[in-house]
Image: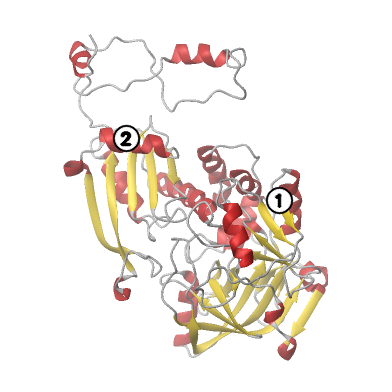
Amino acid sequence: MSDLRTWLEWVEALGQLQRVAAPVDWDEELGAITYLVASRENAPALLFENVCGHPGWRVLSNLIGSSLDRLALTLGLPPGLRPLECIAASRERVRRRLPPVEVAWAEAPLAARVWQGAEVDLTALPAPKFWPRDGGRYVGSGTVLITRHPETGTLNLGTYRQMLHGPREVGVYISPGKDGLQHLQAAWRRGEALPAVAVYGLDPLLLVVGSQSFGAHTSEYDVAGGIRGEPVAVVRGPVTGLPIPATAEIAVEGFLDPDALRREGPLGEFTGYYGRPAGAAPVLRVEALYCREQPILTAAMAAEYPICEQALFIALARAARLWDDLERLGVPGIRGVYAHPAAAAGFAMVVVSLEQRYAGHAAQVLALAAQAPSTAYYTKWIIAVDEDVDPSDLNQVLWALSVRCHPTRDIDLLRRTWSTPLDPSQNDEADRPYGAKVLINACRDLRPPGHTAPRALLREQTYRRVAARWGELGFVGAPPRPPALDPGEAPLPAETKFAAGVE
């Protein structure tokens, strides 16, 4: 059975795990250390082994962070991949589905320690308070909440923040439109409590899939099994009957009672701002707590990139799914898709590279990418570039915006689109669920050859000659591969030579 501890062994073997044995306070100090370490790209994962006041419990922060190698390991891919290579390699895995397999309670590492009813005390967990103005300690940041729709029976694993209220109460904030909130609303309309499981220490793969929207009728367990190529081992929860990851570090079972609301938040969020103002949120009434020996709480810090725990994996997962969405819709010529993690954890910007094949091709891609299931939520900037631009290279994207986009002709706007109350650019709280999207065509104008200036590119024959001598020339590693090369066979038309300033 795959678990967090096996993953940590792989990460440590890569030299990307730093153990912190010195005493660390959960009250802002753990968050400050995480922020400072993670502020440089490819910073290590941090395992805090001595959290003040919580002996025997550990906290893992910056799990994946901005490390592409740790994300590749999580997806079952080899380290050393570039962003587009990682996206392309993960697409086939994300398409596969493999249902979970149930194991006996006695076989589950999670069942090592059990507290029920009045025995439960969640204040024993080393839940951090990350930011000075946070509303409280957040036991649920690097976590998933497991629910089942009371009418359709569909199972959902979602990443929703959870603030610790007391020994047996946790506030759960779920953004409008998310599957978990739809499950909750359906149960409350029937006057019923919604059974729920919160997993507070988990396999990072479940954190990755739980952050994505795979459709109302797709279980994230099935997606995770397909990615890994083996089913997720689960045990049936004695209280709720919901399937719980058998190798989880920490999990609780409980109920979200009808109209049970309590003040929650604010929390420093992925935007680099505090999220929505403190307000009423559902309360999880906890009936049972389970954990392994020497359990590890997974704590995902939310902040601007590269500190934001979820930025890289959300960005790459959204890109892979948008690439699939476009191809499923029959759009030809897609050469690459990237969601930039620095753009509010990958939520705010996507760039699509395409080989234009007909008039209106780029406009079609922009319109579909703006409202595809994978990217409709919150995305503000949708940019189309040609196949000679690497969408993961922001320098190349800015170049395309500068030389191929004419603002009065190539920019469109969509209004009243799906957004989030966490967007700090909306001052009016009533408007926050709505957003807007800018569609930017940064592709070449499709005109007959000779009517537009040509791109200055390396000759392919010259590139191959230099690449073959890379080591001889004294350079280490593989030579960089330009996104496009000039075949160098046909001479430039006379009118193009003049337009390009070449005599």
Q: Are marks 1 and 2 in contact (CB under 8 Å)?
A: no
Tag 2's secondary structure?
helix
Where 441 sits versus 497, above or below? below
The residue labelled by disc 1 is: 17
Foreground residue among 266 and 459: 266
Pinpoint residue 159: horizontal percent, then vertical percent: 54, 66
**Around disc 1, counting alpha carbons within 10 Å, would you say few (fewer than 14), some (14 to 19), or many (20 or more)?**
many
Q: In the image, which is nearer the foreground, mark 1 or mark 2?
A: 1
Foreground residue among 177 and 264: 264
The residue labelled by disc 2 is: 400
Quadrant housing the C terminus: top left
Pinpoint residue 398: horizontal percent, then vertical percent: 34, 38
Amino acid residing under circle 1: Leu
Pinpoint residue 319: horizontal percent, then vertical percent: 46, 48
**Residue name at image x 62 percent, y 23 percent:** 476
Residue 429 in view here:
yes
**Residue name at image x 43 percent, y 64 percent:** 273
- Left/right of residue 301 with respect to residue 351 in the rendered view: right
**Residue name at image x 72 percent, y 79 percent:** 124
Pinpoint residue 488: horizontal percent, then vertical percent: 37, 12
